Image (cartoon, grey):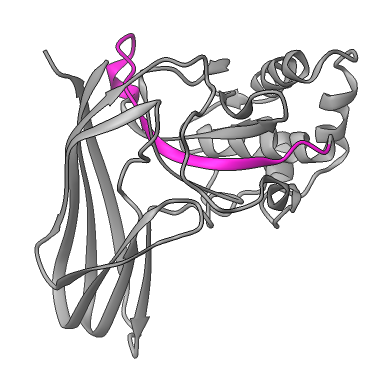
Amino acid sequence: MIIKVNHKTSYKYSTEVPKLIQCVKLYPTECENQKIMEWEINCNSGKIVESHIDGLGHKILNIYNKNFSGELEITSKGIVKTKDLSGIMKGLSEKVNPLCFLRNTNLTLPCEMIENLTKKIKKKNLIEFAHELNLSVSNSIKYVSGSTSTSTSSREAIEQGEGVCQDYAHILISAARLCDIPARYVNGFLYDDLNASENATHAWGELFLKEVGWVGFDPSHKKCVDDKYIRINSGFDFLDASIIKGIKLNYNGNESLESKVFIEPCQ
């Protein structure tokens, strides 16, 4: 499948920002599952500097602004050719040992309700267990837009019984790590031809299964990732995998954020 993406993030500041530095991770992953045909990242102010490629293969950019006021727009757009490999991520360029992703964070700490999800699954081979775990997480909460925030933990989401894609991913990651399965959070885009209104920045999980390697599972859609997904980056949780992180020096004003994305198949 060939997918076209146009993503824009807008920041508004109430007063002048003396120094603003933003770390951007918005380049799609290069692997066998997807190939970048075109991609560019731009901003309406500041200097864009290519920083480095991290241990997970993410291409990092930094944007520098001084004495900035008004609205800052960061856009990323391009065309990606994707392939359905049954969720198995092939050809990832990374140097990090998968066992690192057994470590939990404050957003993925387990609780009794999450532990019970794992106990409901009968012993099977690892691949079958992972698929059953994904379905179990899918049924553990109800998708309700706006029901949680970026600081909501896996425990808080499952206890209140509702959440969004970020929360499904955190619960899956927490449950997998309880079972000694390395798991991580993934940010990306999803083209949903059945419900175009859901086209947005999306989140899911990846589990490391010894037989096949990293496999992408999307509990909010009850399936493995396929050719409708574009993978951007991964990390321990939402915060670690944030596509844009900013530092404001000597700034005491307010900041507001708005993000929009348009996703469509190329003819």
Q: Nearer the viewer, residue 255 or 48?
A: 48
Q: Which residues are magenta?
A: 180-198
Q: Residue furthest top?
A: 194
Residue at (24, 41) in percent of width and height: 260
Image-quadrant location for residue 6: top left
Q: Is residue 75 left or right of residue 250?
A: left
Q: Position of residue 259 (x, y in %)?
A: 27, 47
Q: Position of residue 190 (x, y in %)?
A: 36, 26
Q: Is residue 21 left or right of residue 211?
A: left
Residue at (48, 21) in percent of width and height: 225
Q: Is residue 104 above or below residue 78?
A: below
Residue at (87, 18) in percent of width and height: 120
Q: Is residue 64 above or below residue 242?
A: below
Q: Is residue 231 left or right of residue 108?
A: left
Give yes or no for residue 195 being in the magenta stretch: yes
Q: Nearer the viewer, residue 114 or 133?
A: 133
Count of all numbered marks drawn on residues in the image:
0
